[in-house]
Image: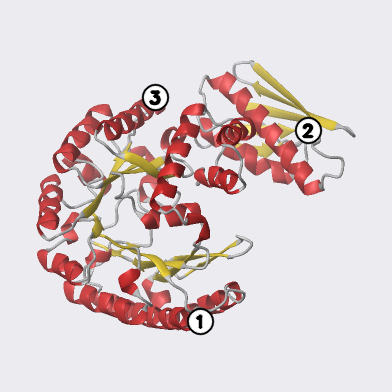
Amino acid sequence: MKMNLYGINDERLVRPLQLIADLFYEECEVQWADETTEEMDFSITVDIQREKTGFQVDVILKNHKSGTKQTESSARDWPSQDLSDKDAFKLIKREISRCFLKTLQTETGIVQKWGFLTGIRPTKLLHKEMQNGTPIQQAHQKLKEEYMIQDEKIDLMQQIVERQLAMIPDLYSLKNEVSIYIGIPFCPTKCAYCTFPAYAINGKQGKVDSFLGGLHFEIRKIGAWLKEKGINITTIYYGGGTPTSITAEEMDLLYEEMYTSFPDVKNVREITVEAGRPDTITPAKLEVLNKWNIDRISINPQSYTQETLKAIGRHHTVEETIEKFWIAREHGMKNINMDLIIGLPGEGTAELAHSLEETEKLMPESLTVHTLSFKRASEMTRHKSRYKVADRPEVERMMDMASEWTKEHGYVPYYLYRQKNILGNLENVGYAFPGQESLYNIMIMEEMQTIIGLGCGASSKFVHPETGKITRFANPKDPKSYNEGFEHYTDEKIKILEELFSSVPAKK
């Protein structure tokens, strides 16, 4: 589908319009109209009238197949007469986005509950207002006016922000601490929907050995720097891949390195190890976790329908998920997270109802409900025609089912994020029993502190303690490149950390 754009020549406006069009139509392209333009499905005409006191935006959407035409207009006063060009552009872009969204909602009959918000961390907006001392009702009204977010989603954001502050009362003052993400880039197999840096581990012991050598080096070097500067660690998270793909002996040595190299690990608020693939969990590995006082893990069924697991490339069985859950309980795992994915191929409300029934028999401390996203580089996206997924109304019903089920069973929402190409323009929500929320998930989503990424494919997010400016730095995604350059990438991270924390007084 093609939409041709008329009336404006500012390329900064094309991307926002493309993102909004993507909310309504798959494989839609917004392009400039010129003399070479041939067939088109829609034309978008944007007219901007700027005056001394304000401006007006008119957006006309014409469907060339049906002949229908939708028109929306918005007039606004400038908030001040000395507004910068950058701030003026932001206001104009917002009103164009608002009008374009309205035309598409009228054309399609689809109401976007998140409005034209396409960012992945909506709760950051509400946190910002709270930090600025904005009264709650005023903050909510601002979200409705600026992004057209509906009350249902604003209420969800408010619940999450309140839970986060209940769990981490000092959330806004943790900027002088860091969290650590450790990426293990191996899995038993690659799932069809996955774009994480994950490689099938079978037959790759040489690569595993080399990778672990580099990872130990990173932990030692970063740990030494943190000790020297007196910087505490808030949370540590082992992700991937599947961190429990490596052997129990390798896990033991890795956690020993963590305790030896990092400062004051006994007082780290939370250490999590993703054991997402049940086929990687063994009693020996659980004993290693116990040895190092790690009792928060993830065991991720994704679905309790065996045909679905086979279709998406997960080689464990439903029975194995349940069995490994109870083995983990017997080995002292007191805080278990489980993931479910809404909208997996071939699944609808009946399959989700079954998954929720099975979850009720286990009652993990937290349950993360993901909505399937067609990620650009995934197997599922490359061969989309092979995978039949539920339509938008059914996906919305499934999300409502999950929300109602968690509420009925005592879970509360505590974090959310959104992704491009997510089914139904919905969201991923983490639920937990009060007091069992993942602190790391809160830290990574709300971007209140620096998170240092170690390991293959690990991305660091450096948050300036004073300005809040975010700088990203990623390690190589493939083990070969990582093994060849881990020393260089470690040194580069330390250089960024030196500059970042230069104004922070060292603790004695």
Q: How far apart are marks 2 and 1 (CA)?
A: 49 Å
Position of the N terminus by quadrant: top right
Q: Mark 3 points at which residue?
A: 393
- The residue carrying pointer 2 sits among few (fewer than 14), some (14 to 19) or many (20 or more) residues within 10 Å by Cα, namely few
Callout 1 secondary element: helix
Q: Is mark 3 on a helix, strand or loop?
A: helix
Horizontal side, residue 359 vs residue 491: left or right: left
Residue type of the residue flagged with mark 2 = Gly
Q: Distance between the residues labelled 1 and 3?
A: 50 Å
Q: Looking at the image, is mark 2 or mark 1 earlier in the sequence?
A: 2
- Is residue 291 placed above or below 322 in the rendered structure? below
Q: On the image, numbered disc 2 is attached to which residue? A: 7
From the top left corner, tell me how far across and down residue 331 is, in percent. 12, 61
First-in-chain label (1 vs 3) = 3
Categorize mark 3 by other alpha carbons within 10 Å: few (<14), some (14-19), many (20+). few
Which of the 4 image quadrants contains residue 465? Answer: bottom right
Left or right: residue 161 compared with residue 45: left
Q: Mark 1 points at which residue?
A: 491
For the residue pair 189 and 426, the one nearer the viewer reads as: 426
